[in-house]
Amino acid sequence: MKGSSQSYQIALSAIACAFASAALTLGSYVDVLLGAAYVIAVLALMIPLARDYLWGDALCYVATFLLTFLFCGFSYLYLVPFAVFFGLHPLANYLQRRFVKKRPLFFLCEILKAVWFDLAVWLSFSLLGEVLGLTQAAWYPYVEKYFFLVLFVGGTLFFALYDALVFYAQRCVNAVLRRLRK
């Protein structure tokens, strides 16, 4: 394939931004769809990375956040998990896959990303727990005593599965975009 033009990079990043913004906007208006909106936004942000467009992905992340912030009436609460973790995670995985070749460094990166995820979940729960009604749930009084243990052990186990699925999803997005011709 010939070298890509900048207009192609801009168009591909704009399409990814449109999908991510639409998903996050819908997820912020319909609470049940919020988790699916994060997943769709993460998949959309993988599109520029499939063509090695780092700047396209970074600008897509910023534009997605700003557009969704505007479309949601300047409500930032639902965007906090996207802003602190989910929007940057595909870029972190891309950089890890591209530059980290030794296994000990790979595991160190995984540990750092797991701590990053756990802190993002803690921040998100602190901000959104009351808004989404999680603190009034029937299970919360039982978990409250061991909240940090549940958060860090359960969050780390969940992150290991999530991170493996995101690596796999990036390979799938790469394969789909390889088939598309310019």
Image (spheres, rainbow, N blue to C red):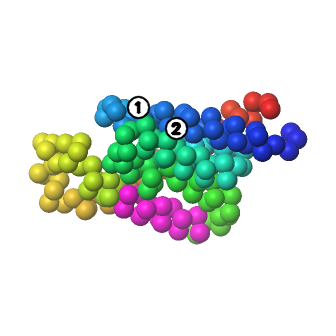
Q: Is residue 35 above or below residue 121?
A: above
Q: Which residues are magenta?
A: 105-120
Residue pushed farthest right?
2
Q: Residue 8: say if magenta.
A: no
Q: For the residue marked with disc 2, what is the amino acid? A: Ala
Question: In the shown orientation, is residue 84 left or right of residue 147?
Answer: right
| Residue 171 shows in this picture | no
Q: Residue at x 68, y 58 (%)?
A: 98
User: What SS does tag 2 mark?
Assistant: helix
Q: Quadrant of the N terminus?
A: top right
Q: What's the residue at 63%, 38% (across, down)?
A: 14
User: 171 left or right of 3?
Assistant: left
Q: Earlier in the sequence, mark 1 or mark 2?
A: 2
Q: Kindly identify which residue carries mark 1.
A: 26
Q: Give the amino acid at mark 1.
A: Leu
x%, y% of residue 136? 13, 44
Residue nearer the viewer, 82 or 162: 82
Q: Residue drawn at (72%, 49%), measured in percent from left and top?
A: 52
> Which of the labelled discs sits on residue 20, or is there none?
2
Which quarter of the image is occupied by the C terminus? top right
Circle count: 2
Residue at 44%, 41% in the rendered image = 70
Side (left or right) of 133 relative to 14:
left
- The secondary element bearing badge 1 is classed as helix
Residue 164 image position (x, y, % from top left): 52, 48
How packed mark 2 is, by other alpha carbons closer than 10 Å (few <14, some 14-19, many 20 or more), is: many
**Mark 1 surroundings: few (<14), some (14-19) or many (≥20) residues within 10 A:** some
As drawn, is 160 to the left or to the right of 91? left
Separation of residues labelled 1 and 2 (CA atoms): 10 Å
Which is more toward the observer, 41 or 106? 41
